[in-house]
Image: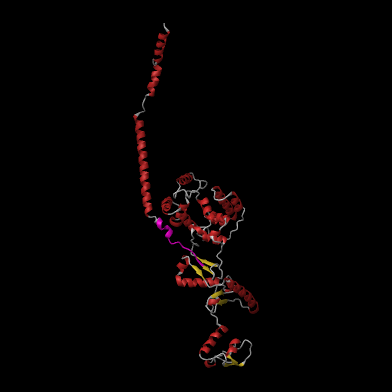
Amino acid sequence: MPISKLSRRYGRMNQAKTPVLAKLEKQKKIKPPKSLKKWLKILIIAFTIVVCLGFISATMAIVIVSRDLPDPNKLIERSVSQSTKIYDRTGTHLLYEIYNDQKRTLIDLDQISKYAQQATVAVEDKYFYTHKGIRIPSIIRATVNNLLGRSSGGGGASTLTQQLIKNAVVGNEHSYLRKIKEAIMALRLEKKYTKDEILKMYLNEIPYGSTNYGIESASQSYFQKKAKDLTLAEAATLAALPQASTKYLNDPQALLNRRDTVLELMYQQNYITQAQKDEAQNTALQMKQNTDVLEAPHFILYVKQLLDDSFGEKTVDEGGLKVITTLDYDKQKIAESIVKKIGDVNEKKYKANNAALVAMDPKTGEVLSMVGSRDFNNNDIQGKYNVAVLGKRQPGSSLKPFIYLEAFAKGYTPETVIYDVQTNFDKRTGGNYTPKNYSGKEYGLVTMRSALQGSLNIT
């Protein structure tokens, strides 16, 4: 047989289907049962309905919740309690701050150290300048952590804007409704205000421990300086506080570690150099906690009473007044020293347990110094009682110039001669008031000038 015919023959043989191959191809063409297709279709429809219902429900919930939210346009205009500050006559020595529950001073962003701004963003919300109020990845991460029972390790879901809303508007209630309100308000806030305006509101609003609200109050309390003068180390310390202020204020080592973490974050986010980070981390933690000690306490309480009488307690406690008094700070310190020195002597010598002093400008009547007792904190002598203002004491010889002035107004002169002899001034009423001169002597005929000059008592 020719080869060509053999090839054609065997070729046709190869193309012929064997029974086994035909069975396999038939199995491949078997279609899935109709019931499976039906269930798939039902599942797809059900899933679509659930998604749509969920979307509709979420939209309705947002609309309902949104109705009770304040207008973000008015957030920056709302009334915020501020402490009233009382200064000496120069306006440089802060004598005392008056406040209700929150000690706060509102300031502009340019009055806040750049380090403080950067440290806050670095530790609280490193995506602050890129997000629009909320971060979906952070929310998802926090939700997963909550479902898995993790209390930490994944980072918080709240942006800096949301934290501002929590502190200023919706409060600290732990609920999903509060979180929804917080997110909605954050989105609205970001549309209305610039990042700098939001950061300014945040730094003026956030609590820094104790009664200190806002960075200016915290800076004054913990470092005795304005927020604009904070160093890098100090700024990082304040940025460390809001997360857990009570814990850190009561544990210096924990606060130091937290401060160093803030500095590390600032370095990682390119706010500071390695050298700046190292220098700040090697700086000792020098932080004071202001215990609201009164400077010139009797004078301050006297001024506060005048303020309350003039403006009302609410205005004084929350109105953020700046009060410049007549007090001369240097003279006040001298007066306190004199009262203590002479008071100690008089106690030993005469058993006089108290003393007071008031210095006034005779031309203007301004109070330059006031010491109401030997020791404001001594309850044994009722030290808080202001003897200088409230004490009902006879004026003694200090009244004599006024009596002589009245005599001069009636025609007497400094050269008028009067008698300095022992006299019972209550004889007409049957009493016996017979004072004596300090020297115990009588000087007979004297001029009014000499009598006043010698502070004679029986003329």
Identified at 36% across, 34% down, the residue is 40
Q: In this rendered view, identify the residue nearer to me: 91 or 22.
A: 91
Q: Is residue 341 magenta?
A: no
Can residue 34 be seen from the camera position used here?
yes
In what quadrant of the picture does the N terminus appear?
top left
Number of numbered discs: 0
Across and down, in percent, residue 140 comes to 46, 45
Closer to us: 290 or 11: 11
**Residue 80, image x, y percentages:** 45, 61
Q: Is residue 217 left or right of residue 132?
A: right
Residue 50, by quadrant, is top left
Identify the residue at image location x=36%, y=36%: 44
The C terminus, quarter of image:
bottom right
Q: Is residue 413 above or below residue 389?
A: below
Is residue 76 within the magenta segment? yes
Q: Looking at the picture, does residue 18 appear above or below residue 443?
A: above
Residue found at x 59% / y 73%: 331
User: Compared to 193, does 53 lie above or below?
Assistant: above
Q: Can residue 457 be seen here?
A: no
Please state the horizontal and vertical placement of residue 260, each as a whole percent of the image.
Answer: 58, 51
| Residue at the outermost top position | 1
Q: x, y (%) of residue 28?
A: 39, 23
From which residue to which does the magenta span run?
Answer: 72-85
